[in-house]
Amino acid sequence: MPKKLPKILSREEFELLLKQAPKVKRVSAKNKREYILAMILGGEAGLRISEIVGLENRVPILTKDKIDLQAHTIRIESGKGKKDRVVCVPPRFRENHLRMLPLKIQRRALQHFITKLGKDVLGKEISFHTMRHYFASQLVEKGVPLHQVQMLLGHQRLDTTGIYLHANPIKTIEDARKVFEE
């Protein structure tokens, strides 16, 4: 089965979503703060929605003890495939965010918020997983080696991570042309 290219966001689109998120109506201020923090963890650390708001044996997966602000790391001890990994703390993550953990929001509510935000702000259908695609595509675009992106995403197979090499076909075509113009 051929794989579809992931839906990706540009840096400008991600920033616009973060800027507009506090303006969404009919969502409590507390939930908005938690949704925005979840977006940052997904978009700037590559966490899955299940790693942010999921439970493992009735215990939240992402808790404050998993974050080391001194080392700038987040330890994910569970998640898809039960593979442990370490990811970077997003630059926007602050010490006061630790008090918000574990996030006490519903997965479906967070997903609904992201979908609505994408339609209202960007006019496109996105999911929370789009934040993770944004993270991966930004790394690949900046030249981070694919095996390092694989490690950060917690992918078992390199070909799964490889889809981000083709996430921006226009840039890929431009880069290919440059090779032969030299």
Image (spheres, rainbow, N blue to C red):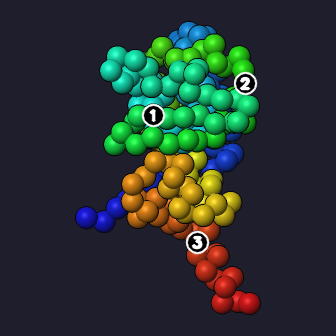
Which of the 4 quarters of the picture holds residue 46?
top right
Picture coordinates of residue 114, whole percent (x, y): 50, 31
From mark 2 to mark 3, how far is it between C-alphas?
A: 35 Å
Helix, strand or loop status at disc 1: loop
Residue at 49% x, 35% y: name it.
Answer: 76
From mark 3 to mark 1, how far is it between C-alphas?
A: 35 Å
The residue labelled by disc 2 is 94
Residue 172 is labelled as 3
Q: Is residue 90 depicted above or below 36 in this figure?
A: below
Picture coordinates of residue 147, whole percent (x, y): 53, 61
The residue labelled by disc 1 is 77
Q: Of marks 3 and 1, which one's residue comes earlier in the chain? A: 1
Specify whether residue 163 is in view: no
Q: Do callouts 3 and 1 mark residues in contact (Cβ within 8 Å)?
A: no
Residue at 58% x, 75% y: name it.
Answer: 173
**Circle 1 Cα neighbour tier, 10 Å, few/some/many (<14 / 14–19 / ≥20):** some
Task: Name the side, left or right, on which 13 lies relative to 27.
Answer: right
> Looking at the image, is mark 3 or mark 1 nearer the viewer?
1
**Circle 2 Cα neighbour tier, 10 Å, few/some/many (<14 / 14–19 / ≥20):** few
Helix, strand or loop status at disc 3: helix
